Amino acid sequence: MTDQPQRQYRLDYRPPAYLVDTVALDFDIQENNTQVTAQLAVARNVAGPAGPWRLDGRGMRLVRVAIDGADLAHDAYELTDTALWLDNLPSVFELTIVTELDPETNLSLEGLYRSGAILCTQCEATGFSRITYFPDRPDVMARFTTRIEADAARYPVLLSNGNCTQAGMAQPGRHYAIYEDPFAKPCYLFALVAGDLGVIRDTYTTASGREVALAVFTEHGNEPQCHHALDALKKAMAWDEATYDLEYDLDQFFIVAVGSFNMGAMENKGLNIFNTACVFAHPETATDGDFARVRDVVAHEYFHNYTGNRVTCRDWFQLSLKEGLTVYREHQFAIDHGSPGVTRIEQVRMIRDIQFPEDGGPRAHPVRPDSYIEMNNFYTITVYEKGAELIRMIAQMAGREAFTDAVKHYLHKHDGQAVTIEDFVVAMEETTGLDLAQFRHWYSHAGTPRVAISQQHENNTLTLTLSQSTPATPGQPNKPVFDIPISLAVFDTAGSQQVPPQLVRLNHARKKIVYKDVPEPAVVSALRGLSAPVKLTQDTTERDLVCLMAHDSDPVSRWDAAQSLYMTHLLACVDAIRADHALPGLGDGLSQAITRLLADWPADRALLAEMLTLPSTIQIGEAFERIDVAAIDGARRAVRQQIGSRFEEELTALATAHAPRSTYVFDQDAAGRRAVFALALGYLAETGVEGIEAWCRTVYDEADNMTDRMAALGALQYCPGATRDRLLGDFARRFANEPLVMDKWLRLQVSAPDIDAVAQARALLQDPAFDFTNPNRLRALLGGLVRGNAPAFHRADGAGYALLVDEILRIDAFNPQMAAALAGLIAPWQRYDARYGQGMRAGLSRLDGAELSDNTREIVASGLADAPN
């Protein structure tokens, strides 16, 4: 048997050779190791392949293997670094496996490991294979019983999936707890937590009158930061009942917050384990964005109870089956609990800033990938967020009520099963009546389709011509014609609606739509709400965009019109910088649009903040064949300064009107007002208006919340000097014992435009206090440098690339998931101007010459795949 990494192909799927009905796990947690005894009730699967049975396992010591109580001799099985192979097995038998683990030295953050004072598990995608030997695949579903025994003083809290059926003292100084999960689940949903934990508790009464015990566990002292998460959980439970008739199915639902976690959170049945960054939310330590993220992630993981747990994936190629649908449900929930327009704008921005570049780079892959070497590399924005956009398109075409009924049908039809994306699409067709045969291309083809809309207007007849094309992606040179829902509306130049919003399915390469009795001139609002994840080219004029920005009834379209106006000017500025020409002025149309916006504030202040925010440097870069980092950053900063100078008086009035005046509360209106204040303060700081440093200092000193404090510090990033240094120093002292807040400080340390950010990052990495084994620290510092200060990272001498590669090589030795994610930051080198791309490629080549994990090797190989020799 081979241990070499093998590429897995979706079309090679075979049913499991053996099925596991029940699993009884016994964890004996000692001071220096943990012994795990697993008893499996196994039966031959007549639909599975013949031959030896593979049980996955790595990073542990095998102590015993027994069949029906009889120990196997060493020559009766084969053990490799990644698997236990058994052969000549009976049709039905009990398998006993004893393994020994060392969670204290497990830095991979997979399997059973220590995070601070907490022992916890992370089993998705294949972390269970670090606990015991098992067929670690999602289509093997079993009912689990878990017994945990540990020192009662060191580990007074013992938790696992399901309901606690028994607890007590095991022997002097030690205690135990037994949990039974009545629902069959794949092993990736197994969870265990042991530690000395603080807790906050509550209850929730379901629609049928059952009382569910709720709790959030965390290290002692952090309990006050967990109340928002508990409140979000109750809102999510109520929303899922009201929207989908989904009632929680166990007697208890627990959340545990741990400091070291590769992901945001994990939906283990009844026992969700979270990164503290997605649980902790207190006004003094968390921003409005943090509060919203906690609310939405808590809801996301809870929603997985049905869309992911009760109905799960047949294999990991189907990951978007659970994640795309659950992200869509999270999006619905967020829209219902915040500013609907701005919430959707945030979702659109994520698609355009992260997913579109992924679709245009070397790692482009379909929502349902065709192959992989390391599954952890496919927990991507494409699988999650683009997957959610596909669900959203189906919901738009079906209508919300019909779609909701279809989801209920899907869950009822496949309850307790491990199924495929095709099963989901069929369920949608069965209930809604939609023909989704052509729509299926979205799941199997990578890339971002381009949609072009041209218009002809004569004799009050408006003719729109829609066309589509999709660029080639790695391994997929030829693209099919997609089924693309395009939301359209037509206005006159005064903003009066002439054609009400409607959904048009562009399911041909070219399509014409004719509207009669539309007075000239007409303004077409297309792709409203980003009705499909495509790039739109439309022959709109500046006048049209100004009209839509002021009058469109869809907030996303209003924002999009503003983005288009900004982008036209930004691109002209980039061209001017590259040609060493003088920058163009703002222009009459853009100035008129901003003037109108600043004179007539939308009631939704969060929308106002979004409409005054320029496109990101990533979005600007997407408009060019090759990314010129310095020119793009220079253009964006210059335009911010132009707007700040031209509208200094109006922005000052805006900031003054929205300045902090009352005690912090997290709600839509208050968060919107704080967003406007922070934005206006930032414009004024970058412009360098008189008195701005003193204003920021006053805001910082008087703030009763982290949002305003970060607004002041963020603005001061553009004002080097004593004030900025003093406040950053005070911030570090004040929050030295708050790791999540210190992550914000780390980002600030490397994001200022006037510092040697690479040298700063190296110094912080070498500080004995920096925990480089903690993913949150690494994301804050290295992510803050690469994404938050692109000019510093992409400096001409290559020092930024060298720093990143150094850290990837160090991290890959113990946390391949994190190392692979960091390697992905330089993989799309061919998208960059040669003076950046060659340095990024050299970094990949250096990695390619090192001994790497399968995770990182796959990312590096994809980046170099099309590189010239």
Image (spheres, rainbow, N blue to C red):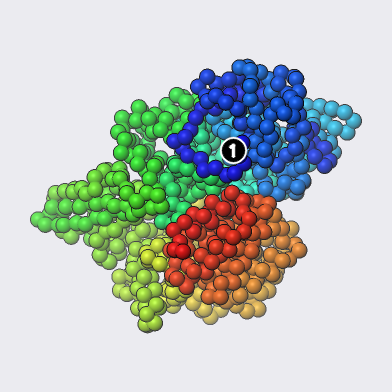
> Does residue 666 appear in the picture of this structure?
no
Does residue 427 show up?
Answer: yes
Task: Identify the residue at the far front of this view.
Answer: 75
Q: Position of residue 238 (x, y in %)?
A: 53, 34
Dot 1, how many residues are within 10 Å of its Cα: few (below 14), some (14-19), or many (20+)? Answer: many
Q: Nearer the viewer, residue 329 or 778?
A: 778
Horizontal and vertical percent position of residue 206: 57, 28
Residue that appears at 62% across and 51% down = 853
384 up-or-down from 731: above or below? above
- Quadrant hosting residue 648: bottom left
Give the labeled residue for mark 1.
267
Specify the farthest residue to the left.
459
Against 206, residue 821 (above or below) is below
Image side of residue 186 versus residue 768, left or right: left
In front: 612, or 78?
Answer: 78
Residue shown at 75% from the left, 19% from the top: 69
At x 16%, y 57%, the residue is: 456
Give the quadrant of residue 349: bottom left
Q: Is residue 387 above or below residue 27?
A: below
Residue 502 percent location from the top left of the image:
27, 44
Q: Nearer the viewer, residue 334 or 427?
A: 427
Q: Residue furthest right?
A: 172
Q: Quadrant of the N terminus?
A: top right
Which amino acid, mark 1? Glu
Q: Secondary structure at mark 1?
A: loop
Q: Is residue 764 left or right of residue 336?
A: right
Seen in the image, is 263 located left or right of residue 646? right
Residue shown at the point (41%, 56%) measured from the top left: 360
Q: Left of 647 or right of it: where is 176?
A: right
Give coordinates of residue 33: x percent, y percent: 80, 39
Mark count? 1
